[in-house]
Amino acid sequence: MSKTNENPTYWKSLNQLANNEEYKKFLEREFPENASELKDGMSRKNFLRIMGASIALAGFAACRRPVEKILPYKTRPEEVVPGNPLYYATAMPYRGSLTGLVVETHEGRPTKIEGNTEHPASMGNTNTQMQGAILGLYDPDRAHGITSDGQKKSWDDFLSFAKQNFTSDKKVAFLCEANSSLTLNRLKKDALKKFKNAEWVTYEPFGEQNALEGNNQAFGKKLRTYNHFDKAKVIVSLDADFLQQGSENVTNIGNYTRGRALESTKDSMNRLYAVESNYSLTGSNADHRLRIKNSEVELFTYALAASLADKIGGLEAFKGYNNHFSNHSWVSVLTEDLLNNKGESIVAAGNDQNPAVHAAVAAINMALENKDKTVSYYDVPTFETGNDTQRFYELTRDLKAGKYDALVMIGTNPVFTAPSDLDFSSALKATKTTVLLSQYHDETARQTQWHVNRAHFLEQWGDGTSYTGVKSVIQPMIQPLYGGKSEIEYLYAIINGTSGDGHKLVRETWKSYLSSTNFENQWEKILHDGILPNTEFDTPRVSLSSSFATYMNQAFAQAKKPGDNEIELVIKPDNKIIDGRYGNIGWLQELPDPVTKITWDNVALMSLKTAATFGVKNEDVVSITSGGKTVKLAAWVLPGHADNSITIWAGYGRKGIGRIADDDFGIYVDNKYKTLPFEVHKFESKNVFPFVTTDNPLYHTSVTVKKTGEYYSIASTQDHSSMEGRPLARQGTLDTYREDPHFAPEMEEVAGIEKKSYRKFPDALYTPQEGYDYLPQWGMSIDLNSCIGCGTCTIACQAENNIPVVGKEQVKRGREMHWVRTDRYFIGNDAGDPEIIHQPVPCMQCELAPCEEVCPVAATTHSRTGLNQMTYNRCIGTRYCANNCPYKVRRFNFFNFSKEFLSSGDDPEVIQMAMNPDVTVRFRGVMEKCTYCVQRLNRAQIDRQLETKNQSFKPVDGSVQTACQQACPANAINFGDISDPNSKVVKVKHNERNYIMLDVLNTRPRTSYLAKIRNPNPKMS
Amino acid sequence: MSQIFPKWANRVPKRLTIGSIVLLNAIIFGVWYFFSPRYLDVGYQPIQPIPYSHAIHAGKLGIDCRYCHTSVEKSPHANIPPTQTCMNCHSQINSKKPKQIAKIRDHWKSGEPIKWIRVNKLPEYVNFNHSAHINAGVGCVTCHGRIDKMQVVHQVEPLNMAWCINCHKNPAPHLRPVSQVTNMNWKAPNGNPEAYGKKIMAARNIHAPTYCDGCHY
């Protein structure tokens, strides 16, 4: 971005860019249409039911004070002090490896998950799925017990069944999800010893099997690739969404943002190039992004390798290769930039790309001398030999042929996710004995003989390794709520026919890792710290295998340029629910997707041009056909998506799983019902897994797409809370920043102050309320240069502050309750290929708060610590404050959302356990908003008073963190006492990039932003 | 022509006016007094499952409050003691009411918690922190009354916001040395709690928050 086009267009949706009638209508109202009215019958009925119940209760409650009982312990556990939370280290198995966590428990009830600062995969941070795990634990829809052919069974029944059926003469097949458990692998060896002809296969629909196979072809060994994004100066992502997908994404986000952190103009930063079809989260953070079809990524990789082969050794296999990308400007620019940064660059390929791409990328990284500098190859001892994908296919075929007596499944859901031409259901029918361990009574469970309900990781003993191999122990926080069993207890029962205690099994395993003389002390230390340090996997010496050139030649022959007018279909794991495994977690379903801002649904994503060829707009239903399978989905135009390509997220369209995951939203035949009511016709399944076949695992090169003339409503938050194109999210290039470090605060002219005096405020109309000197003055800074827009802050806030889930219908009406939203702006005038900037917006805690001036009942006022406080019990729900808030951060309880959320299901008391006891659960008709986690601040303040015997009321800098700050994997949020000149937040706020959103209004917010800096290559423009 | 209204009707408007003023005042006073926590909540004295007497334990025997309510100095909650605390003594001592002691021992054996009934309760939207108040030198007796003289515990203060705020605006008369917090008989020297409290406030740097999110969040 040069000086001349310093103010490009920022827009949230195509409607806004076009500034059409629909958008104007939307803007004119504080709340979207129907947000404050009850028009449809359904809701009115609901409303009356709720109100009726409340009035009845109120009437009785007034007669007599309700008797409340206090139940003390029989013997109080030593560490428990009622009212003070305890923190325990544990770890979460996430897509095949562990991430270290610290869990907050209140009297034995886990309520909040944080990262473990000691753990290398976490560094104190988490991602959305980890934050959502708390709701997953208390999910009332999890399977409540063991079933066999529809009958309820006990654990003892299962044991006697296992004893009878799993005798050593049986031919047993094991199908296991990707996992790193050390104890499971120990038991696996026992199993393979006992069952002589057994087969053990790992199956994961969106796993790392292609990357492993690629490395196997390149190096002759199945090795795991780990990229050190903090050490790289140039990163090339070939469809690699490393900030969102993959089990190591928390580490990647941390490393990537560390490689871009700017404290002054002297610092340098990395440069990210992204080549992809869909607009991914990684693509939205890239300095340069090339949109090409997914099937062309392979061709681009080979062209890049061929171009590099002319300059450096090690890529002889690619010499002489050329295709239509060989003369592409990107190839020459990338070649030059990579060669200039040998040993400091990374080329990364997406997990869903085929093995040949990974092999080529491995060769490129070797040739660029990146190995052991920016790229490591780990030898993971728990991997089986062979190609996991092929082995799974073979196993299924063998099962269908009746070659096995029994099938034991651990955690997977192949009936839902396996390629449709494999027909996994018939494999289950052909096998005499089938058993499954899983959390929900899912698609596979319904077709298996025995289903054992699985314990949540917060309920079980376990262990495992991080992505890089660091060993950890999983310790339980609570007894299994529904009597679930862990995978090790389940496998032990199948092998031995007796019940094994998880705790003992894990300790047994760890005897081989710890010294026998000092076992107890070391064990205690591991439980306390959460890790056994210095246990990374080996990084063996590698060289390209002799068969590499032949392998690549085969790949060249198969890689063909797709036809220009062919429509390609790409299946991607969902950003929130992955393959559907987190589908019943309401927090994740309601989190707006980082790029499209869509909640609750999957759509057919396509570019503006492609949509025009089909004549479809957003929410028009299209039917997509390939290989005899058809799926009907709403179309959604995503600016920046590759042309002639359609991306669909997997994991949606499920039935009978739970009240959140199940799909029961309606479809409309007639446009006039487009807004409400919802249920006209039940929508056919939005499940895209039927498209997955053994030949075309994750993309189809040629599909037919038809507009059906029907409509399907999508709840997207992209236009909600719009701020009409003012410079709210600000960015510049590294060059502009170095030339003019203060470019960001000067982007908006403020009446009453000189342009250069950006840290002064103009005179105020109101007298600002002064804080007391003895109290801390809280302030926050959000670094847009670090923020990648993942949305972890939103979920962390939701978990900490008891924020309810409102449902798709309510989101559609603009009633989502998230206290911190992440705004996504498209930048640029080309609607086909814009840039993206993300901006999290919590309450700004204005010192001259416009909301406070208009509240008729003084329910929102100013505290002496500088917070704009919200007093729920005073609020009468006029919503004047939300109208007067220029940042649109106030949320209103249009219904008794919390009560609905907390009193649904068979045992509502379970979901109530997920609530934070330190925060009030809000009622209908009450306004709420970000409080800077005042419950944490007050506790820290009181703790400090107790510590210093009242001499100080100001917590030590860094001793108190807000929930969003603590969870943020990019460390973009700084928070602290701005009256302390040495606090980190003050130092950050003195950065030249610091600016205030809408400073022209002179609201004097306590939250400020640091402008985003991009690092474009001058040769690209 | 005879009068339509009898003569006494002349007095009706006057009486009605006076009557309605009296009635209105009575209603206002009635609501103001009878609907207030001072009338409704003070004196709430539920029957506990075991007739534990604070008068005997805290009064006659002089056991310190913190022997049972251990977390009061370090946690927002003053805990109800676990059954084990009772058994510390009552595994040996039988007292004059062996039936009641047997109940405790039954709970101890079965592991069933004793279901005490809560007496002092604040609404859910108020966050009260015991440790902060104890640390500042607010005596137990200030809010809970003469527990050491109660056979059955009852609520002494209205615990409404006006009552809280009164003290937060002027904490001086209610402060004492931290060492005397559990002392039910403590009196300010020279009979002037206000002056003594002011000294404590200055010496111990005491500030009571009066802004909303000091308690409401």
Image: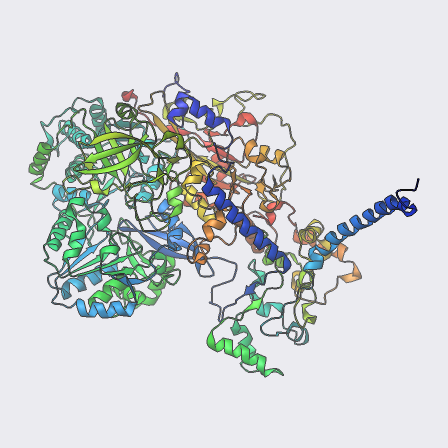
- Locate residue A476: give its quadrant: bottom left
Residue depicted at x 54% and y 45% = A924
Q: Residue furthest top?
A: A4
Foreground residue, A348 or A953? Answer: A348
Residue depicted at x 63% and y 42% = A772
- Locate residue B131: give its quadrant: bottom right
Quarter of the picture holding the N terminus of chain A: top left
In the displayed structure, A699 sits above or below A471; it is: above
Quarter of the picture holding the C terminus of chain A: top left
Residue depicted at x 51% and y 62% = A81
The answer to whether residue B2 is left or right of residue A79 is right
Foreground residue, A879 or A849? Answer: A879
The answer to whether residue A88 is left or right of residue A391 is right
Q: Residue A648: image x %, image y %?
A: 27, 36
Does the image show residue A509? yes
In the displayed structure, A646 sits above or below A651; it is: above
- Locate residue A805: give its quadrant: top left
Q: Residue furthest front?
A: B1
Q: Residue A66: image x %, image y %?
A: 59, 61
Q: Residue A298: image x %, image y %?
A: 17, 33
Foreground residue, B176 or A23? Answer: A23
The answer to whether residue A926 is left or right of residue A230 is right
Does the image show residue A743? no
Foreground residue, A84 or A482? Answer: A482
